[in-house]
Image (cartoon, rainbow, N blue to C red):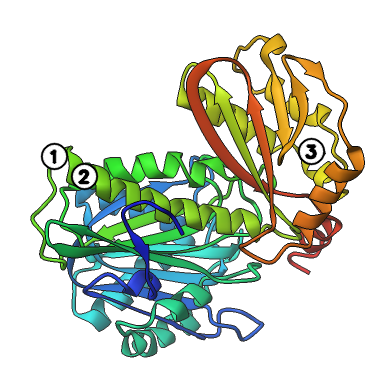
């Protein structure tokens, strides 16, 4: 996956020591597909979270925010798919607390040690009878090899489950980070619409772990867009339980940097997997921007380009309309001299020093066509490179093309 100081391993969220997981069919979805997931730490874990910035927030989001504000630790994450439990009023809050209480009772732990997530149709309450009845079976199914089943149980319109695990060495012991996510539509930064859960067996201070997660989110989930819509349920939770038995990381330094780099790699993998699986998408779009004063500015321009509906539609149609790239860069709100603008599509230079270049349109169109027919996770990426000056700032964002199927899927979402 990378030439950095870690390697990819199997297991997803159960790859780190001391974590169990499960996914079952509880009857929340009419499809009969798995719809209830559990991640469980054998011991108390430090917990960090990043949540939607929407003013309309699901009950599970409010519940987690309140719990983490009081005590940033947890033993379990319970996630249902099928109903979002968002815009459901006081009853939605009561349902959320009832879910936590029921799981806590079954596990014989305090409700404050439970974190929650939901995904599905906004405005629909959780099917509480089915969920409560499924909790004993869910707990019984949780194993140290259950990461894949949990990843499948949180899917909605996703075509594939999304999980990853990486391992590095800190001191003389292995440290692992695992992650899983769901997301396909209603994806846009702040946060990018998704559910994502990360597990880690390192010991790390609460403050440092939250700072690491927030920075990782800015470089990953907040740089992915599918359709420009931000969800009511966006939730990123990371648990670190210390079961690797490495010395606690409590200050900035080489070990903290190494752990954060691996955490960021996990989050970026999951973010790209979400963009790649965008509703109706045929390819992944990666936008690399350079030449700004700061990385923040470069990331902002990259997000604007990746989120342009006109550009996304052109890429779906295999139309190398580079003017839409220039347009999107210009409206990002970051000052730059247009005479410095340069644009590349893959290896094909389209613009340099603010001037259009003669290029092989057939070759550029074929490049886009090849990406749309590419093998999943290997050759399906359209790379757009944009330079706006000579500054040291760099940023990357990810998106996908905009196809006819996106309209069809979302036109019929609740019918």
Mark 3 burial class by Cα count in 10 Å: few <14, some 14-19, many 20+ = many
Q: Are marks 2 and 1 in contact (CB under 8 Å)?
A: yes
Q: Position of residue 187 (x, y in %)?
A: 61, 49
Label 3 belongs to which residue? 311
Q: Is residue 183 above or below residue 258?
A: below
Label 1 belongs to which residue? 251
> For this rendering, which residue is in front, 127 or 46?
46
Label 2 belongs to which residue? 256
Residue 241 seen in the figure: no
The disc, 2 or 1, on the residue closer to the chain's N-terminal end is 1
Q: Is residue 169 above or below residue 103?
A: above
Q: Is residue 184 above or below residue 264?
A: below
Instruction: Report whether 173 appears left or right of 217.
Output: left
> For this rendering, which residue is in front, 307 or 342?
342
| Real-space Cα separation, disc 1 to disc 3, in angstroms | 43 Å
Instruction: Residue at 81%, 31% (x, y): give it.
Output: 322
Tell me the SS state at disc 2. helix
| Real-space Cα separation, disc 2 to disc 3, in angstroms | 39 Å
């Amino acid at each position: 996956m990378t030439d950095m100081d870690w390697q990819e391993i199997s297991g997803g969220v159960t790859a780190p020591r001391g974590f169990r997981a499960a996914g079952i069919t509880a009857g929340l979805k009419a499809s009969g597909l798995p719809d209830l997931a559990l991640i469980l730490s054998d011991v108390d874990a430090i917990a960090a979270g990043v949540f939607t910035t929407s003013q309309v927030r699901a009950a599970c989001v409010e519940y987690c925010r309140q719990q983490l504000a009081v005590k940033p630790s947890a033993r379990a994450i319970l996630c249902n798919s099928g109903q979002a439990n968002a815009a459901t009023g006081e009853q939605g809050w009561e349902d959320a607390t009832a879910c936590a209480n029921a799981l806590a009772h079954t596990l014989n732990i305090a409700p404050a040690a439970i974190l929650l997530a939901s995904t599905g149709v906004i405005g629909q309450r959780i099917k509480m009878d089915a969920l409560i009845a499924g909790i004993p079976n869910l707990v019984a199914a949780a194993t140290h090899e259950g990461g894949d089943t949990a990843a499948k149980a949180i899917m909605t319109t996703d075509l594939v489950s999304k999980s990853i695990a990486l391992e590095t060495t800190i001191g003389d012991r292995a440290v692992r980070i695992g992650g899983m996510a769901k997301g396909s539509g209603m994806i846009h930064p702040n946060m990018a619409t998704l559910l994502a859960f990360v597990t880690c067996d390192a010991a790390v201070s609460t403050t440092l772990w939250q700072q690491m997660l927030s920075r990782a989110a800015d470089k990953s989930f907040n740089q992915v867009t599918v359709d420009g819509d931000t969800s009511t349920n966006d939730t990123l939770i990371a648990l670190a339980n210390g079961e690797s038995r490495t010395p606690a990381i409590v200050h900035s330094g080489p070990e903290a940097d190494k752990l954060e780099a691996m955490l960021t790699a996990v989050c970026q993998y999951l973010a790209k997997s979400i963009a790649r699986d965008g509703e109706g998408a045929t390819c992944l779009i990666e936008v690399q921007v350079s030449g700004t004063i700061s990385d923040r500015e470069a990331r902002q321009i990259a997000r604007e380009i990746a989120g342009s509906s006109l550009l996304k539609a052109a890429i779906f149609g295999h139309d190398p309309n580079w003017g839409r790239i220039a347009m999107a860069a210009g409206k990002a709100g970051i000052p730059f001299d247009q005479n410095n603008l340069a644009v590349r599509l893959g290896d094909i230079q389209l613009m340099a020093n603010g001037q259009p270049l003669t290029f092989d349109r057939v070759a550029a169109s074929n490049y886009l066509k090849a990406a749309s027919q590419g093998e999943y996770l290997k050759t399906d990426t359209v790379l757009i490179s944009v330079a706006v000056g000579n500054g040291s700032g760099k940023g990357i964002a990810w998106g996908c093309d905009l196809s006819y199927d996106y309209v069809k899927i979302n036109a019929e979402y609740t019918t």
